[in-house]
Image: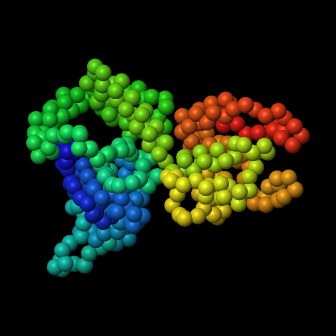
Amino acid sequence: MLARLVHRPVVSTNISPPAFFRVIEEARPTLLIDEADRLLRGSQELRGILNSGYTRSTAYVMRTCPLRHPPATGRAPVPAATLPAPAAVSSALGPPASDLHPPSVGLVSFSAWCPKALAGIGRLPDTLADRCILIQMQRKTQQEQCDRLRDLRTTSLREQCLRFVHDHQSAIAAAQPLIPATLNDRAADIWEPLFVLADLVGGSWPDLAREAAIQLTAAAHEHAPIGFLLLDILILMLPLPEGRIFSRTLADGLNRLTDRPWRTRQKVSELWIAQQLRPYGIQPHTVRIGQTQAKGYVFQDFRDTFQRYIPRAEIDALKAQYCSQPRPASTPDTAEPSAPHPA
């Protein structure tokens, strides 16, 4: 359906990194990639280019290519800021093999910035998902009826879209739409063009667009594996009087949990936990619980990360459950002078 509606659609189920940025440079398309789960699984290079393509100013790939006109002898190297502009790249590419003069190799920048839609099974890599609007699709049931795609006529819709942009191009360029405060910076950047269009259409669309942005962004965060892992760690640490836990105890607790989004291996080890937490600045260190010392974690080290990466709805639900439970009377053995709290 998107291929029939978008501007200059280019559809692919398999694309190499060089073909990826070259087709963007030459065709200025809307790039539609199917089977993204298989394509991205084995291509760190393509994932990096997709990540950089999130904004126009950073979406450039640098390559050395044959140049048709070699620079004059003795000329100083060309600064990166004066490299050939994207529109001029194709004309700067090297001569055919039959050229009498050997080609000169120079540094050329290719743009990787264009609208993109990716379809795949499972989750996108977290760094890429954070730069996307995620829409969960489901297979329809036998009771649900849908029109056949082959019956969809989109010519008039495309013409209306073109006319709308032509009539409102000045307003679109100057617009500064109201951004919901709950959206993070990347989500705000991604949704801003859609807010502009919704505001121009008017009626109920401005409210609907912002509601959709808030709900879809929240749903994407709630399904992030690291958010679930941190939530499970929080639940395991909450009952601990001193807010401390040994690494081996944490691993045992996580191994008792099944069917979790973060489960990628048969058994959770202390090393695996440390690897997952390291990017967030959380590292195991020697802690004392009672008369025993071993490698472990302290609740205070997690506090900032819990607040940033566990969905607020989960925190509020856990807080309500925690506060509704009857608190045992304090005794010398059960006193909780520094018991952690989800708030």
Q: Give the camera-side residue of 101 and 272.
A: 272
Q: Give the camera-side residue of 105 and 273.
A: 273
Q: What percent of the width, then of the height, locates residue 39?
A: 34, 62
Task: Tell me if residue 271 comes above or below residue 205 in the rendering.
Answer: below
Q: Give the camera-side residue of 69 and 23.
A: 23
Task: Say which quadrant the C terminus sits in.
Answer: top right
Name the quadrant containing residue 80.
Answer: bottom left
In the image: residue 39, left or right of residue 338: left
Name the quadrant containing residue 27.
Answer: bottom left
In the image: residue 193, left or right of residue 29: right
- The residue lying at 87 percent from left, 43 percent from top is 333
- The residue lying at 54 percent from left, 55 percent from top is 258
- The residue lying at 33 percent from left, 54 percent from top is 120
What colour-coding does the image apply?
Answer: rainbow
In the image: residue 9, left or right of residue 176: left
- The residue lying at 60 percent from left, 48 percent from top is 232
Count of numbered marks: 0
Residue 52 shows in the view: no
Q: What percent of the width, then of the height, locates residue 342?
A: 66, 37
Task: Tell me if residue 106 comes above or below residue 109 in the rendering.
Answer: below
Task: Say which quadrant the N terminus sits in.
Answer: top left
Residue 138 shows in the view: yes
Q: Which residue occupies the extreme top position in the image?
A: 203
Q: What percent of the width, then of the height, locates residue 146?
A: 19, 40
Q: What percent of the width, then of the height, locates residue 123?
A: 41, 53
